[in-house]
Image (cartoon, rainbow, N blue to C red):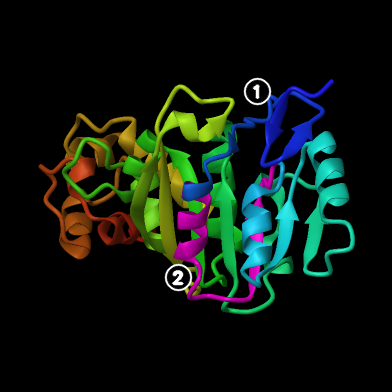
């Protein structure tokens, strides 16, 4: 039995909480998202197409689309909906474990997606690792996550996710999306973030992120005490001079490049 008509098509399953399925149904928002990538006509890698509303708008505007969908029933529905559409391909896989380099065809490609909140950060880190050759990523997150991604030093939202995001790309919030734009409606406001990835930023993302996690777990302390705890025996004054910060500063006061230089000094 169908549970909802989404863009004129009856779903035969109820969106899964486990898969973080909140389908975008607001046609105005769909058009605004596609407008963002309209200056990159060509190929789009779409994360989690769901019932295919964004996919359909992309195809209508002349894009070719490779969708990544893990949910079995959704994938079957997408294959049926776009059967015979030569510009649509589907990969049944977990986007958090997908090698995006194998799907991106040219430097003009775009990665686009309404990310499941439960795995949004994991997917973003996978893009840091394997998706930086794209021209742009346009991704939707829970608003609080978007604020952390784009936060500046000295703000309360600034932390590990801000630093890694801003070393891998240039992110900016584009617009917010109300809960009523989805089915089922989430309990939070969503935000579309546009990223311009840095193809040359080839960092040891996992090791660097692990280090930042340790540093920001002590964020109330000054950097001098943090280094004494995390890197005992190291010449903290020399490190501070080499990296350009004061040992009395706290982690949220250091810009992203300074955190990276510090990591390289601690782990040469």
Task: Specify whether residue 63 is painted magenta.
Answer: no
Horizontal and vertical percent position of residue 25: 57, 39
Q: Which residues are magenta?
A: 29-50
Residue assigned mark 2: 198
Crowd around label 1: few <14 · some 14–19 · many ≥20 (10 Å): few
Viewport quadrant of the N terminus: top right
Left or right for 183, reference 19 = left
Residue 72's image quarter?
Answer: top right
**Residue located beneath label 1 in the image:** 17
> Image point 65% across, 45% down: which residue?
96
Label count reads 2
Q: Is residue 187 left or right of residue 216?
A: right
Asked whether 267 or 259 is in front, the reply is 259
Give the secondary structure at mark 2: loop
Q: Is residue 74 left or right of residue 226?
A: right
Location of residue 238 (image quadrant): bottom left
Which of the two residues, 55 or 112, is positioned nearer the viewer here? 55
Secondary-structure class at tag 1: loop
Q: Position of residue 124 (x, y in %)?
A: 53, 49
Which quadrant of the figure contains the C terminus?
bottom left
Q: Residue at x 64, y 32 (%)?
A: 21
Q: Residues within 10 Å of mark 2 (few under 14, many from 20)?
A: some
Residue drawn at point x = 23 percent, y = 51 percent: 235
Left or right for 211, reference 247: right
Front: mark 2 or 1: 1
Measured in 3D between alpha carbons, the distance from the residue under mark 2 to the one under mark 1, in whole angstroms, is 33 Å
């Amino acid at each position: 039995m169908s549970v909802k008509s989404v863009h004129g098509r009856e779903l035969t399953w109820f969106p899964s909480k486990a898969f973080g399925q909140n389908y975008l149904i607001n046609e105005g928002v769909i058009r605004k998202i596609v407008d963002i990538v309209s200056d990159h006509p060509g190929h789009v890698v779409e994360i989690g197409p769901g019932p295919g509303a964004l996919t359909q708008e992309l195809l209508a505007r002349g894009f070719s689309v490779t969708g990544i969908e893990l949910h079995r029933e959704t994938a079957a529905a997408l294959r049926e909906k776009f059967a015979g559409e030569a510009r649509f391909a589907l990969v049944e896989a977990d986007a958090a474990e997908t090698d995006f380099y194998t799907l991106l065809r040219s430097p003009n490609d775009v990665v686009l997606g309404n990310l499941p909140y439960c795995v949004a950060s994991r997917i973003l880190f996978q893009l840091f690792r394997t998706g930086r050759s794209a021209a742009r990523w346009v991704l939707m997150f829970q608003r609080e996550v978007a604020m952390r991604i784009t936060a500046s030093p000295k703000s309360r939202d600034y932390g590990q996710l801000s630093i890694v995001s801003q070393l891998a790309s240039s992110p900016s919030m584009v617009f917010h999306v109300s809960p009523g734009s989805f089915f089922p409606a989430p309990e939070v406001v969503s935000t579309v973030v546009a990223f311009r990835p840095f193809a040359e930023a080839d960092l040891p993302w996992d090791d660097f992120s692990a280090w930042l996690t340790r540093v920001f777990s002590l964020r109330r302390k000054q950097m001098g005490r943090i280094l004494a705890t995390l890197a005992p025996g190291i010449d903290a004054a020399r490190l501070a001079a080499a990296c350009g910060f004061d040992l009395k500063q706290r982690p949220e006061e250091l810009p992203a490049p300074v955190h990276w230089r510090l990591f390289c000094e601690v782990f040469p």
